[in-house]
Amino acid sequence: MAIYLGFDLSTQSLTAIAIDVERSRRRVLFERSLVFDDELPHYGTRHGVLPQDDPLVATSSPSMWAEALDRMMAVIAREGGFDLRSVRAISGSAQQHGSVYIKGTAPAAFTTLDPARPLVGQVSGMLSRPDAPIWMDASTAAECAAITRAVGGAEALARLTGSRAFERFTGSQIKKFAERDPTGYARTDRIHLVSSFAASLLAGRHAPIEPGDGSGMNLMDIAHRRWAPAALAATAPDLLRRLPALAFSWTVVGPLARYWTERYGFPAARVVAWSGDNPCSLIGTGIVREGRIAISLGTSDTLFGLLHEPRVDPSGTGHLFGAPTGDYMSLVCCRNGSLARERVRDAHGMDWVGFSRCFETTGPGNGGAIMLPWFEPEITPTVLQAGVRRYGLDPADGPANVRAVVEAQMLALILHSRWMGVDVDTIHATGGAARNRAILQVMADVHDADVYQLEVGNSACLGAALRAYHADRVADGLPTDWDDVVAGFAEPVAATRIRPVPAHVAVYARLARVYEACEAHALGRGGDPVEVIAAFRARA
Ligand code: XUL
């Protein structure tokens, strides 16, 4: 039996999955999550984020991630219910863009991790900065502007790295750290992404960064998959020697470190480079061909597809990333995902059942009422000053606000993904909220596409395990086609199909114009949408 392990180190939790890839009985053998706020309360995180005075700053704790990994490995060894000796390879997925700052003493510390002592005490001493800026950080607008200027403008940076400068991307975060804490930066020998940091802990050596996650840094030449000297020079002094090597997504970093084999009895399985959660989700939702898209409804809501040729968003909102298949992926990310849905639910004292029921008592289009659910600074479109905006929507009307938040999220995704040029007829839905069929009906109607749920809910984690399987085959000289890798795991479940309702599709085609006008007005780029709303209502 060959077993592959996948991890997902996300904003709020660490999940592990074990899969059996034997063709006749492909299945998930084990799946477990560990929620940081609940199970590691001594770090004081809220939704996985450390408390901050400045609402634009968002950091988390690499020590917490290490402790979570240690605990999860113990759980797998104790409760996995399978023979650990069958584990052939391990990979992972991590929240994108976050960075971990490591001292020069770390290489030795990685190789000499003592199996007799918990990991966390040994990791804390490796860090040249105790916290890690994460993807929710929006505090680096000035650094983004400086990087953009230095590389010759937003379009030039997007063509070079796949995205214009974004506050949460690693480059501007590194620049901020290097300028505000030059001593800390001087002490830093290596800057890892969350993904490569976790892979380093497993392999007991510095792991490389692969192109999927490397393209979320504003530092990688996306066409050639190597560090871009112009971007590095615009970011921080002496940066090249501080960055891990770039390597193919299917790189085997090394065997599992002695820490894990001796402490928990794992075999010296292959540790495969970790990637970002979105690139891993691409695999875990079966988007291994062009023309299919997936929407992930998690802490952030993302829409993504696979591209064979690079295509950059001319409006500068979307991203081009490397795909773990060696192709490219297009992605749009909205920060106000599950937290915004939760905020609306809580404001009206509902549970999720009550939330879903609101779709029965309100109609598609919500009578032209629009919410711009920017509870936190938003990524798509760029909104640095958080604040919910309502147009023709009574803040006290619970059901209307529930419908409004979901309709706005779906309309923002479609509006800002037009540049991808994909003619969508099928959407694979994933993430926690993809269990909610009322939300998926809005998704189907807004996109005029069939929506399918997938058997395995955590597609990032599944994608990581499937990447481990793929890399293991490559390492054995038996490369396997991606369609075969995902078969039986990441296929949409036919019985879950949600079809668009033609009458609703027509309503949303008109509501999209109302939403666009409200968004433009809120961003100071358009006039008062009152007439557009009135015209919508007149035809409703
Ligand atoms: C993608 C992004 C988020 C994080 C969430 O660009 O910032 O989806 O990866 O974990």
Image (cartoon, rainbow, N blue to C red):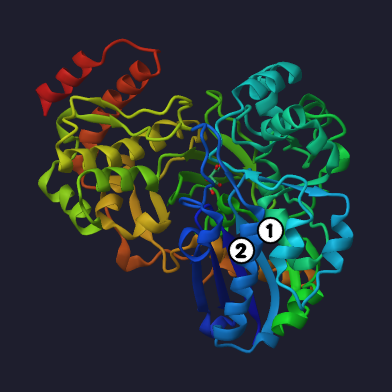
Q: Which residue is mark 2?
A: 464
Q: Which residue is mark 1?
A: 274
Q: Quadrant of residue 236?
A: top right
| Dot 2 crowding, Cα within 10 Å, few <14, some 14–19, many 20+ | many
Instruction: Label 2, secondary structure: give it.
Output: helix
Image x and y of residue 102, in percent: 79, 49
Image x and y of residue 502, in percent: 21, 43
Relative to 161, say whether 452 is above or below.
below
Relative to 449, say whether 23 is above or below.
below
Relative to 154, say whether 108 is above or below.
below
Image x and y of residue 281, in percent: 54, 56
| Amino acid found under the numbered disc labelled 1 | Trp
Instruction: For residue 489, say whether it is visible.
Output: no
Farthest residue in the front direction? Answer: 42
Q: Quadrant of residue 149?
A: top right
Nearer the N terminus, badge 1 or badge 2?
Answer: 1
Of 254 and 2, which appears nearest the observer?
Answer: 254
Q: Is mark 1 within 8 Å of ligand 1?
A: no
Q: Residue at x 61, y 63 (%)?
A: 464
Distance from the alpha carbon under mark 1 to that under mark 2: 7 Å
Q: Residue at x 74, y 76 (%)?
A: 260
Of 404 and 396, which appears nearest the observer?
Answer: 396
Q: Quadrant of residue 537?
A: top left
Instruction: For residue 59, say whether it is visible.
Output: yes
Relative to 521, say whether 397 is above or below.
below
Instruction: Label 1, secondary structure: give it.
Output: loop
Image x and y of residue 258, in percent: 81, 76
Is residue 72 rendered to the left or right of residue 302?
A: right
Is residue 421 rendered to the left or right of residue 208?
A: left
